[in-house]
Image: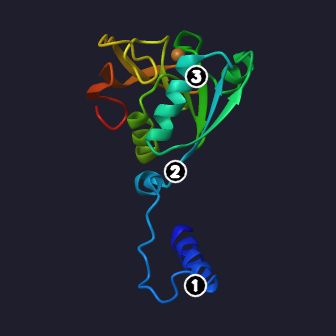
Amino acid sequence: MKLPRLLLSLTAFTAMAGLAACEPQPEVPTPPAAAADAAAAITVYKSPTCGCCGRWADHLAEAGFAVREVELEDLHAVKHANGIPPGLGSCHTAEVAGYAIEGHVPAAEIHRLLAERPAVAGLAVPAMPIGSPGMEQGGRTDRYVVQAFDAEGNSTPYAHYEGPRRLSTDGPNHN
Ligand SMILES: [Cu+2]
């Protein structure tokens, strides 16, 4: 882990700069993202005009991901390169730790994916269900399924949701 070393060097820097030299060492605040899973870096490909894509990216950042947004007019090449099955397409495509993430997948499922590391190509929420992260519209909440898909384009349910609420988990480790 790099974090302890970083904290040490920050402390050393503070001491060298003569700041707080006569004070008790202040507690170094823990960055909020570090606690969860060391701020997994995720790249989000979206069109510049996609509002719900931007709100989904905000949802990821709030959940502790280090989000990099790449704006493209045409996402077809990105979807093809990531092997998104045609029937599972949505408005934006993301890449995290070698997995593809298509559409409004809740951050909790991406955390779960990174913890469980199943042998899949990625996760998808097809289309744009109302009430999914980034698709909030008043109190309306569609039911939808987070699908795990493999490189051959086969998909299996990974979790069931109603709006922001997880109803059940499925997938390779939950048979
Ligand atoms: Cu969308």
Determine the CA span between mark 3 and mark 2: 30 Å
CA distance for labels 2 and 1: 27 Å
Foreground label between 2 and 1 = 1
Viewer-nearest of discs 3 and 2:
2
- Local crowd at mark 1 within 10 Å, few (<14), some, or many (≥20)? some
Camera-side residue of 168 and 40: 40
The reply to whether the C-beta atoms of the residues labelled 1 and 3 are less than 8 Å apart is: no
**Would you call the spot at circle 2 few (<14 residues within 10 Å), some (14-19), or many (20 or more)?**
some
Residue drawn 29% across the image and 13% down it: 139
Q: Earlier in the sequence, mark 3 or mark 2?
A: 2
Q: Which residue lies at the image location 42% right of the left edge and 12% below the top edge? A: 129
Where does the C terminus fall, quadrant-wise?
top left
| Element at label 2 | loop
Would you name the residue on which mark 1 appears?
Answer: 15
Q: Is residue 41 left or right of residue 61?
A: right
Q: Which mark is residue 70?
A: none
Q: Give how far apart the Cα atoms at labels 1 and 3 are.
A: 56 Å
Question: For the residue carrying disc 3, how many other residues have a C-alpha within 10 Å: few (<14), some (14-19), or many (20+)?
Answer: few
Q: Inspect the image, locate mark 1, and give the three-letter code of the amino acid beneath it.
A: Ala
The amino acid type, in three-letter code, at marker 2 is Ala
Q: Which residue is mark 2?
A: 39
Amino acid at pointer 3: Glu
The one of 114 and 136 positioned closer to us in this rendering: 136
Q: Is residue 146 visible?
A: yes
Q: Look at mark 3 in the image and give the residue it sits on.
A: 152
Q: Residue at x 70, y 24 (%)?
A: 78
Q: Disc 2, disc 1: CB below 8 Å?
A: no
Image coordinates of residue 38 in percent, x first then y, are: 49, 55
